[in-house]
Image: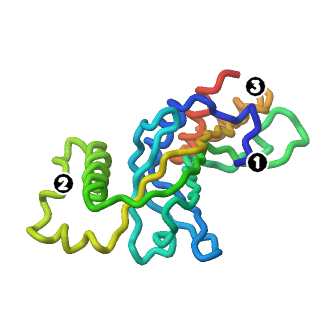
Amino acid sequence: MYNPAHFAVSDMRAVHGFIAENVFATFAGQVGGAIQFAYAPVVLDSEPAPLGRVRFHLARANPLAAIEEGAQLKLSFLGAHVYVSPDWYETPDQVPTWNYVAAEGSGRVRRLNDAGLKKLLSDLSIQEEKVLAPKPPWNLARLSEGRFEQLLPSIIGFELAFETLAGKTKLSQNRAKADAMGVIAALEARGDGASCAVAAAMRKIPR
């Protein structure tokens, strides 16, 4: 990831916090000499320190699911992102850009055994159901007898201990304070979810 120093996030707790809020990852790996992409939610574990690991599953029919044991896999997590118009700057004669928050990591992929895959699926449903409270949480026990075992062979579980992990917040840190505040005001005035999320993240950056 191209990550200039003024955008880089070195605090792993902050990077882990961002991933926990943006668990749907883009994966890239090489299978049979070709780069394959896949998209799936992850469960993030803080161990092994300091970078942690992720667990995830793919459809067995997904081309990336055929990746070799121990092969390198790259992951990208993208948060809110928005176009930034030069009209929002106080400084004249500028050009458009894009503000966003992202994280990127890599590591060697390992397949989970059946017990590990079952635990992953349970942990993933618990992770996502808890944010739907006060709705009573769904869990695997609610499946009819034999249904879970019927579905399990159609997916493959993986784990990846991060060998590299970096966060990036491109939020106008390289702009004058007046320019950044102009962007924040314009985004808040737009009022859509992505614009408000980026504006809120920008307000947390010391100027």
The numbered mark at residue 177 is 3
Residue type highlighted by circle 2: Asn
The outermost residue toward the front is 70
Quick check: can you spot residue 33?
yes
**Distance from the alpha carbon under mark 1 to that under mark 2:** 43 Å
Residue type highlighted by circle 1: Thr
Dot 1 falls on a residue whose secondary structure is: strand
Q: Quadrant of the C terminus?
A: top right
Percent of width and height locating residue 98: 71, 48
Front tag of 2 and 3: 2
Proximity of marks 1 and 2: CB atoms separated by less than 8 Å: no
Percent of width and height locating residue 206: 66, 22
- Upstream in the sequence, badge 2 or badge 3? 2
The outermost residue toward the top is 206
> Badge 1 is on which residue?
97
**Distance from the alpha carbon under mark 2 to that under mark 3:** 48 Å
For residue 58, what is the image quadrant? bottom left
Quick check: can you spot residue 189?
no
Percent of width and height locating residue 88: 75, 39
Left or right position of 153 against 27: left
- Upstream in the sequence, badge 1 or badge 2? 1
Residue positioned 57% across, 53% down in the render: 76
**Distance from the alpha carbon under mark 3 to that under mark 1:** 16 Å
> Badge 2 is on which residue?
139
Dot 3 falls on a residue whose secondary structure is: helix
